[in-house]
Image (cartoon, helix red, strand yellow):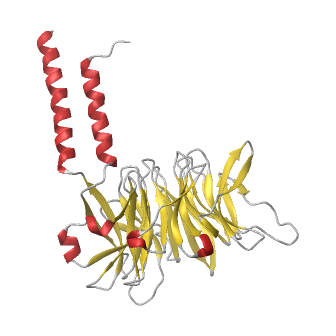
Amino acid sequence: MKIRMGTLTFWATVLLITNANIAIAAKYAFTDIGTLGGDYSIANSINNLGHVVGASTVNANTFSPQAFIWDGSQIARLNQNSHNIGSAFDINDYGQVVGFESINGNFNATLWNNGAVDYLGADSSARGINNSGQIVGDFTNIPTLWAGSNITLLSPPPRNGFSQNGYASAINELGKVVGATNLADNTTRATLWSPNGARFTTTYLATLGGTDSYAYDINDYDLVVGTSYTSNNSEFIATLWNGQSVYNLGALNGSSRSDAFAINNSGQIVGSSFSSIVNSNYATLWENNQIIDLNSLLDADTVNAGWVLNEANDINDNGYIVGNAFNLNTRQTHAFLLSPIPEPETFLMLLVGLGLIGFNSRTRSNQT
């Protein structure tokens, strides 16, 4: 097969653009998503279109958070017909959102779908949804999968009076599910459920040497992130599982506590590290074998405005990050969006690539 120079130039530029998306950004543009009227909000998830969901209070007098969606310009309640306490935990690329609403004091797993609200059952919560519309969470404290009208309890039924309670937190596009399971020896283990025909194969993931571990997210390459105790339960550290090995991701400044909450398909991981010095969390990015305090990548205006990024809860495939930040001036916690700003060198490479395409096009035109 013959490949023309124009084709090579085009794909070289595509690679440049792709690498620009996954390169470590020199800076991030900070966006305060705001609240529904109160003084608290948290962003839990962002899809690849940039839509953000989470929970926010509606007034400063009571802490009664409600599920919200932010479309890039304004924040709005997901359920316009009620004021139920709740939270949105995940959103797919079709705008389907899952979480929970409290009805008569009972949590109900909830699906918000383009204005419609569907309650999936009492004593339940929905935590993750993929682009096929499969939903995972927990029902009566048992890890659960909802697929249309079918409900699958992922843990086995109770035996000898013991029920393997736990939760399912995320599902990838291949239908693989992660979460955690409480075992009979009173330990909790990060768990992977893999579809096997009409059933699921359960795999308990290794710890970093301690007793307990928890899985929070899985990408489409089956990389799993969460948290695990190290030996002697001395540290509780962000963890990566790749199907064969378990890795200690570390923490900022040698902290003894960190959590990895999300991983995208480029392998970028976000979460938080706890600092005992200031008794607070710092939003953390793990990328290219580096542990990065996301606060160090903010511009001066954002820092001077008093914002401190505490937790990074999700990252989409374009590298956009959401979480919650505390403002030292207003003493409020707000949901935030970080938009990566490529380094100047990246822009130069893009311009060179685009220039080569233009030059090659003109050369072909002159030859015809």
Query: In which quarter of the view is residue 365 placed?
Result: top left
> In the picture, which quadrant includes the N terminus?
top left
Q: Residue furthest top?
A: 368
Going 24% across and 51% down the picture, which residue do you hit? 342
User: Could you tell me residue 84's position as x and y percent?
Assistant: 53, 76
Foreground of the two, 348 or 58: 348
Tell me if I can see residue 234 in this picture. yes
User: Could you tell me residue 341's position as x and y percent?
Assistant: 24, 55
**Would you place residue 195 above or below residue 98 in this image?**
above
Foreground of the two, 17 or 76: 17
Foreground of the two, 296 or 108: 296
Going 31% across and 76% down the picture, which residue do you hit? 308
Q: Residue furthest right?
A: 160
Q: Is residue 337 left or right of residue 139?
A: left
Q: Residue furthest front?
A: 232
User: Could you tell me residue 276's position as x and y percent?
Assistant: 42, 82
> In the picture, which quadrant includes the C terminus?
top left
**Would you place residue 41 above or below residue 279 in this image?**
above
Going 69% across and 54% down the picture, which residue do you hit? 203
Q: Is residue 262 left or right of residue 320?
A: right
User: Could you tell me residue 50's position as x and y percent?
Assistant: 36, 55
